[in-house]
Amino acid sequence: MIKIGDKVKFLDDVGGGIVKGFIGKNMANVENEDGFEIPYPVSMLINVDDPLLTRESSKKEEIVQPEVVETVSKRDSGGMILEGRDSPDFYFCFVPYDPQKPLERDIELFFINDSNYNLLVRYAHLKERSFQTLFYGKIVSNSKILLESIGQNDLADLPEYIFQVIYFRDDETDWRQPFSQKIRISPVKFYKESSYQFYDFLGQKALVLRVTENILQGEPYKLPDEDFKKVLKDKEIRQEKKVFQVKKVPEIIEIDLHINELIDNTAGLSNKDILDIQINKVEQEMRSAIPSASKRIVFIHGVGQGILKQEISKLLKKKFPKYSFHDASFKEYGYGATMVILKKK
């Protein structure tokens, strides 16, 4: 157990310091020798004053490291350089503690650097227009780092996940643009069996999202002096074009809440589990629809015993009190739908 005041070392990097506090249950603030506080995953810290914990942590790290079968060319600033890993492949992984029953225990969130690049990464939550940084630091080539853990109770209120990344090789001469990636994930995905696939670099099933989507369009970015003005001009032209690209948004959004429309397999789910999935879907779709140009959203819940309809009503009154709602058109939906008024006509 690591506590405030402990002297620690980083398990996956050089350095260490004194634990000054905690961010949640999985991140600690470590003050290094220069006096700076660095957020770091608790699972990647070794208590240097506790020999037993040091041995156990080292042993645990040896167990989780996959056997490297690729040909190793050399080391680059602490990371492995492997043949065939020259493209910037970075992944955001949701790894269940128990792959057979992913929602019964915590889900660990990893960043995988499956490339020969070294990275400087900032990982943050974006919620209600506010950023909370959970990790920033270096991630060496061909390695992974634990970012945080979440439980089933967290799924109803997931943030947007933000990554800011600089990637580089110590032996290269090109300058590469830093990039940012914003990731939103529907809570429904965690209930779908098909969301979890087996990945060699994890050695188990996980829900994996690619962080490096759309950054490989062309060669490494360079700014020769003679081309600087041209780059700025091209950027201005692209921004002007975007002004005229208006995306059509439907006036009425229809959301079918029947459970078979939301998840692939309901085996093992209780009635409460199913209701939670449906209510999470309602909240997610409301938050998505409010800033859009849509004027109405209809939740199709069916007649049944009226429990889902009652829970939808409770949610709307509690979390979205400024929006009125009523039974949707009987002609179009029968008795089984609720319409929410997002904007007046």
Image (spheres, rainbow, N blue to C red):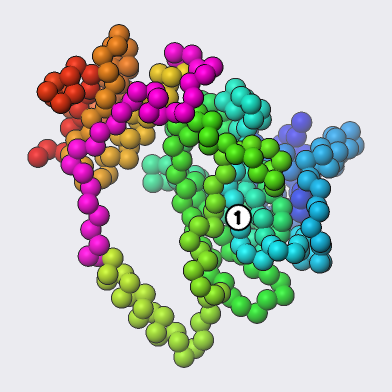
Quarter placement of the C terminus: top left
Q: Is residue 24 left or right of residue 125?
A: right
Q: Residue at x 19, y 16 (%)?
A: 335
Residue 116, image x, y percentages: 70, 63
Magenta span: 243-272
User: Badge 1 is on which residue?
Assistant: 90
Residue at screen point 64% across, 61% down = 119
Indicate the quadrant where residue 323 lies.
Answer: top left
295 lies above or below 133: above
- Residue 27 in the image: state x and y as whole percent: 64, 40
Q: Residue furthest top?
A: 305
Q: Nearer the viewer, residue 131 or 272?
A: 272
> Residue 114's x, y, as percent?
67, 55
In the image, taking residue 309 as reference, residue 96 lies left or right, namely right
Considering every residue shown, the one lying at the far left of the view is: 345
Left or right: residue 309 versus residue 111 is: left
Q: Residue at x 70, y 63 (%)?
A: 84
* In the depicted structure, whether residue 5 falls above or below residue 39: above
User: Please, is residue 177 above or below residue 274 in the view?
Assistant: below
